Amino acid sequence: MKIVEVKHPLVKHKLGLMREQDISTKRFRELASEVGSLLTYERPPTSKRKK
């Protein structure tokens, strides 16, 4: 499996929030969902666009 590093500033910020010690389960899941949504907009560098 190939690993892709995402450098999007919002993803980095939300991952930082997810790493906090005192985060609630609910907030963690909300942030995980937001990160997932942001990642769907990132186009993998190997995918080809249709013309």
Image (cartoon, rainbow, N blue to C red):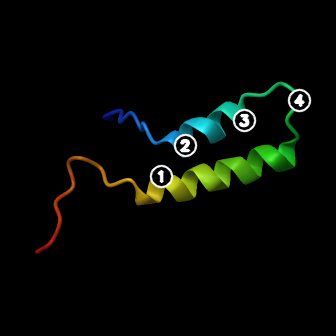
Quarter holding the N terminus is top left
Q: Compare marks 1 and 3 and give the one earlier in the sequence.
A: 3
Report which residue position mark 3 lands on: 17
Q: Compare marks 4 and 2 and give the one earlier in the sequence.
A: 2
- In space, the residues marked 4 and 2 are separated at their CA atoms by 20 Å
Q: Nearer the viewer, mark 1 or mark 3?
A: 3
Neighbour class for label 1 at 10 Å: few (<14), some, many (≥20)? some
Neighbour class for label 4 at 10 Å: few (<14), some, many (≥20)? few
Which mark identifies residue 50?
none
Report which residue position mark 2 lands on: 11
* 45 relative to 51, above or below: above
Q: Position of residue 8 (x, y in %)?
A: 46, 42
Instruction: Kindly check if marks 3 and 4 are in contact, taking CB atoms under 8 A apart as contact.
Output: no
Which mark identifies residue 39?
1
Q: Compare marks 2 and 3 and give the one earlier in the sequence.
A: 2
Instruction: Kindly check if marks 1 and 2 are in contact, taking CB atoms under 8 A apart as contact.
Output: yes
* Quarter where residue 13 is shown: top right
Amino acid type at image mark 3: Leu
